[in-house]
Amino acid sequence: MGSDAFDVVIIGGGPTGMMLASELRLHGVDVLVLERDAEPTRLVRSLGLHARSLEIMDQRGLLDRFLEQGTRHPGIGSFAGIVSPHPVTLDTAHGYTLGIPQPITDRLLADRAAELGAEIRRGQEVTGFEQDDDGVVVELADGSRVRSRWLVGCDGGRSVVRRTLGIDFPGQPATTEWILGEVEATASAEEVAAVSEEVRKTHLGFGIGPTGDGIFRAVVPAASVSEDRTAPPTLDEFRTQLRAYAGTDFGIHSPRSLSRFTDATRLAERYRVGRVLIAGDAAHVHPPLGGQGLNLGIQDAFNLGWKLAAQIDGWAPEDLLDTYFSERHPAAEQVLTITRAQSELISPEPGPQAVRRLLTELIEFEDVARFLAEKIAGTGVRYDFGDGPALLGRRMRDFPLSEGRLYERMRDGRGLLLDSTGTLTVAGWADRVDSVASLDADLGGPALLLRPDGHIAWIGADQGDLRARLRRWFGAATE
């Protein structure tokens, strides 16, 4: 490949790509991010971060940056607009939703990647690539080429990387389309709120409200599903649909952004072919209900980053990189299920409305409300690590240590042994795994081994069992 090749080229500079770049740089991996757009987009496709994503930011020392730029909203949010009649307490230190527009999230993650030394090139459109046993050659629209040992496509639902690999993308095509716009309006905020409240009694796919600076964010069902979704809607089209549903277009003008989205639901059959992988929307698309997409992509990157770094560093167990697919594909499948369900539940048709009335009664049961809240928050994910205690495979929530907090000990992206017995050791893996002994906290077991992503890989007290689990996730011991 040559000495000037990168370790990893990431195609796509959105939140998934920038999160992955940061995770790789924590381990010294040489990273290049190629982003097609010359300037960061102003389009607000996501409005917030859920609890698990907030935990991830906390684990990497980024949470304060996000809290300074966002607004905390108590609770986890509703399921298809159905609000639980009682507050739901989740097993997390971040039992809230952080309202933060996607352009700010994009900027904060890009800043972090750059701080850690990732090279970011904007205005670089990728047209194709070729791979062999040693690496990948990426072809750009300007005729230049870039070489790397690995390639990761974080390039969205119309992913060039996924299509070039020939990965099947099965699922359900779009049946409903919405128009989303950020616009100014001559109508008062009070008039907008009153009309929106009335329309939403029968059309839950409609909404409009202020975002600040005189801007209103509005969403309304389109007249039909567009044949060409790459063509943005016009302001006249937006006005027509607002009048059709609300009886007024609110005097909208001066659009900051106009875009389309649908209820299409698709999940890639594979996440890897040779030295090329996909993550985020390149691997899965779904309706936007519940604000899951950006969060799911960040969590993909958090799972993949340390594993790909281990592969590059040479200590990864043989099948470690394969666990990226075996863990994240089922997680995406769950998100696709709940977003598709919510999309159906906002339909005004009699069948979905009957199911909605039933779910409204069921959500009065606290266990049901918590189950749905964990799905939205992302805190209920449990990876399959085989038989064991209920905590095995789940992420560990933050808690106080004798000095500082758990998440503060995870900033470097290394494994961590939490040992309340004071008798266990990570000798042989100390270059990859840290250890905290003599804990007063209730761990749910005598000792826990956490992977770099915070998921519990082992629970026990036997040194032999621990060594076996260290080999499973962190490779062979050093002499």
Image (tube, rainbow, N blue to C red):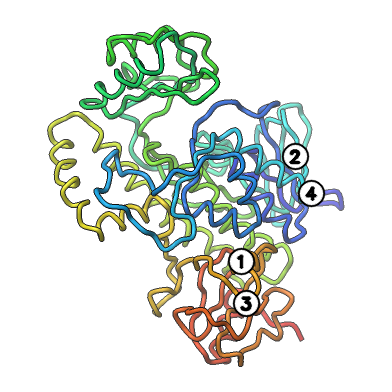
Q: Please say whether residue 167 is visible from this viewpoint.
A: no
Q: Is label 1 in contact with label 4 (beta carbons under 8 Å)? A: no
Residue that badge 4 annotates:
117
Q: Nearer the viewer, residue 85 or 406?
A: 85
Q: Is label 2 in contact with label 4 (beta carbons under 8 Å)? A: no
Rounded to the nearest whole Å, what is the CA distance between mark 2 and mark 1? Answer: 25 Å
Q: Which mark is residue 120?
A: 2
Q: Is label 1 in contact with label 3 (beta carbons under 8 Å)? A: no
Q: Is label 2 in contact with label 3 (beta carbons under 8 Å)? A: no
Residue 274 locus on image (x, y percent): 61, 55
Report the number of discs: 4
Q: Secondary structure at mark 4?
A: loop
Q: Residue at x 38, y 51 (%)?
A: 333
Q: Please say whether residue 366 is visible from this viewpoint.
A: yes
> In the image, is residue 265 above or below residue 317?
above
Left or right? Give the position of 271 relative to 330: right
Dot 1 alpha-carbon crowd within 10 angstroms: few under 14, some 14 to 19, many 20 or more: many
Q: Secondary structure at mark 3?
A: loop
Residue that badge 1 annotates:
452
Left or right? Give the position of 227 relative to 230: left
Rounded to the nearest whole Å, what is the CA distance between mark 2 and mark 3? Answer: 39 Å
Residue that badge 3 annotates:
402
Where residue 469 sits, quadrant-wise, is bottom right
Q: Residue at x 52, y 47 (%)?
A: 297
Rounded to the nearest whole Å, what is the CA distance between mark 1 and mark 3? Answer: 21 Å
Rounded to the nearest whole Å, what is the CA distance between mark 2 and mark 4? Answer: 9 Å
Identify the mark nearer the N-term, 1 or 4.
4
